[in-house]
Image (cartoon, helix red, strand yellow):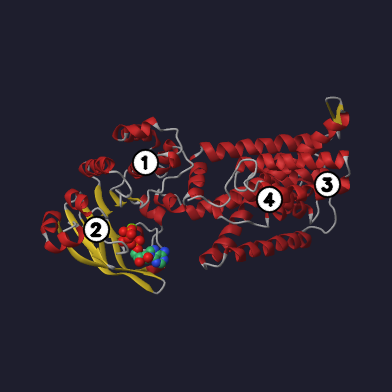
Amino acid sequence: MAPLLELQDFHYYYGNIHTVKGINMKVDEGEMVTIIGANGAGKTTTLQAISGLKEAKGIRGKILFNGKEIQGLSGHRIAAMGLCQVLEGRHVFSKLTVEENLMTGAYLRKDTKNIKDDLKDIYRRFPRLEERRTQLAGTLSGGEQQMLAIGRALINKPKMMLLDEPSLGLAPVIIKEVFKAIREINKEGVTVLFVEQNSKIALNTANRGYVMQVGEVAMEGYCKDLLEDEEVKKAYLGG
Amino acid sequence: MRMLIQLIITGLALGGVYSLISMGYSLIYKASGLMTFAQGDILTVGAFLGLTFYRFLKLPYIVALLLTMAVAFIIGFLLEKGVIRKLLNKNVNAIYIVLATIAVSYIFQNGAQAIWSSKVEYFPSVFSTDSVAVLGVNVQPESLLCIGASMICMILLHFFMTKTRIGTSMRAAAMDSMAAESCGINVSLNTGITWGIAAGIAAIGGIFIGPMYGVYVTLGSKLGTKGFAGAVMGGYGNMYGAMVGGLLLGLLETLVAGYISSELRNLFAYIILIIFLFVKPTGIFNEQAIQDV
Ligand SMILES: Nc1ncnc2c1ncn2[C@@H]1O[C@H](COP(=O)(O)OP(=O)(O)OP(=O)(O)O)[C@@H](O)[C@H]1O
Ligand SMILES: [Mg+2]
């Protein structure tokens, strides 16, 4: 079966700067895959280019989602195909309430009748959000904002969710909670590709992983093998 | 007392029109991070369009109003798509885009002169009587219409922006365009709609004020700078601030004109603008015009 998401010889240029230098990746339906790598490796660039959030003119190569070429499409069209991203740094709408944020996530939904139920479902998953329904999102804690950002992507009923550094700036207990939710979402049938600085939790959560180094894929494989790899241990798992 | 009531009504009518312009400035600033100089001249175009539909084509007033709004919406939308977005895509400095809006403003002015007239055209009255009594004072019914209609516009805009899906998506896109796009919102279309709405409400301001001031080519450019001042007073970029700032400015300058001297009207308005810029740049609604991250 063809993969759900595939990058074929994908490059990204910021002007003349060649940032991502020809990478190949694939994610099968139902999988949970991670990309790890140092600061500036090009992880965010890759993820945002997939979602149509980077200028199209910087892209070379092919991005296939669900069998269709999507490189160069604008972000809202890619979101409409069921490929949703939880952005690095969360990007909640700070002056909208929690519930308005979630409703904005449901912007594309045609089946408006069912949105109420899905809202309940998200509140069941993240009870802290329900308590804060009418609070402005900008006043939430970092962890709550991350949950909101995940909920906002989830309510669009994506086939596939991309997450960019979900652990960024969060306390260990909150990181656990967030990753538990991501695992559940994957179990419920959403294909997941996430970028993480926290390599340990990333490799212990995903099935497969890619290691990016200065714009290239340096290594790839099953997480259990990457966890045993000497180079990975030395460079990303603290020895 | 009679004079005070008279002045308050005239002031609120004028202020209502300022508010309609101010709200456009604020909506555009929020959506695009830009200042446009064309708002006032869109009011002029609106006034001439209204004149055409109502006086020349003899359409019912409400039809003329809606048609004007629709045409102005299209003008505003095309302005964003055809000029602003094109320049933004070239990555030019924001100041060039603002300069482009100055060019557009003169194109509207001179276009209106070429298409319609360089004289002051009278806008036929909307009601059969030319005065009604309010609290024992005779006022022009159009000024009441102006107050009522601009209030209704504000309330409708409030509900549109806060209670509808598209309105909420517009606010979201103004706050964080990348996140909005990732939620499936077509941010570029949204921005065009925002410019369209800003043009639509400015244009009907032209219809409301036409019967009181007449319709002429520079009608809007004067009102436009006052609308800008109102937006600053309220808190630039804040929709509610724009409403309050516009109304307040109209009221205050009319009171100054009535009680002190009508010569001082404009002087007073612009001194207030400068004072606000120095003392309270965030305006009455404390809006941070520089975006907080
Ligand atoms: N808009 C931009 N213009 C020019 N260069 C950029 C731009 N955005 C990112 N870069 C550069 O591209 C490279 C890759 O950045 P990217 O954000 O993709 O890295 P990353 O792997 O996500 O890093 P981090 O782990 O710090 O988030 C960096 O060198 C960065 O400075
Ligand atoms: Mg990154």
- Could you tell me which quadrant the N terminus of chain B lies in? top right
Q: Secondary structure at mark 1?
A: helix
Image coordinates for residue B72, horizontal then vertical, percent = 65, 51
- Mark 3 and 4 residues: CB-CB less than 8 Å, in contact? no
Residue B216 in the figure: left or right of residue B228: right
- Give the structural element (helix, strand or loop) at label 2: strand
Q: Which residue is mark 3?
A: B265
Residue A36 image label: 2
User: Tag 1: residue type?
Assistant: Leu
Tag 2: residue type?
Ile
Q: Quadrant of ligand 1?
A: bottom left
Q: Amino acid at mark 3?
A: Arg
How packed mark 3 is, by other alpha carbons closer than 10 Å (few <14, some 14-19, many 20 or more), is: some
Q: Quadrant of residue B116?
A: bottom right
Of B28 and B274, which appears nearest the observer? B274
Q: Amino acid at mark 4?
A: Phe
Q: Are marks 2 and 1 in contact (CB under 8 Å)?
A: no
Residue at numbered disc 4? B278
Mark 2 to mark 4: distance in Å?
50 Å
Q: Are marks 3 and 1 on the same chain?
A: no
- Who comes first in sequence, dot 2 or dot 1? 2
* Extreme residue in the top direction: B135
Circle 2 Cα neighbour tier, 10 Å, few/some/many (<14 / 14–19 / ≥20): many
Q: Chain of mark 2?
A: A
Q: CA distance from mark 3 to mark 4?
A: 20 Å
Residue to which mark 1 is pinned:
A148
Count of numbered labels shown in the rendering: 4
Marks 2,4: beta carbons within 8 A: no
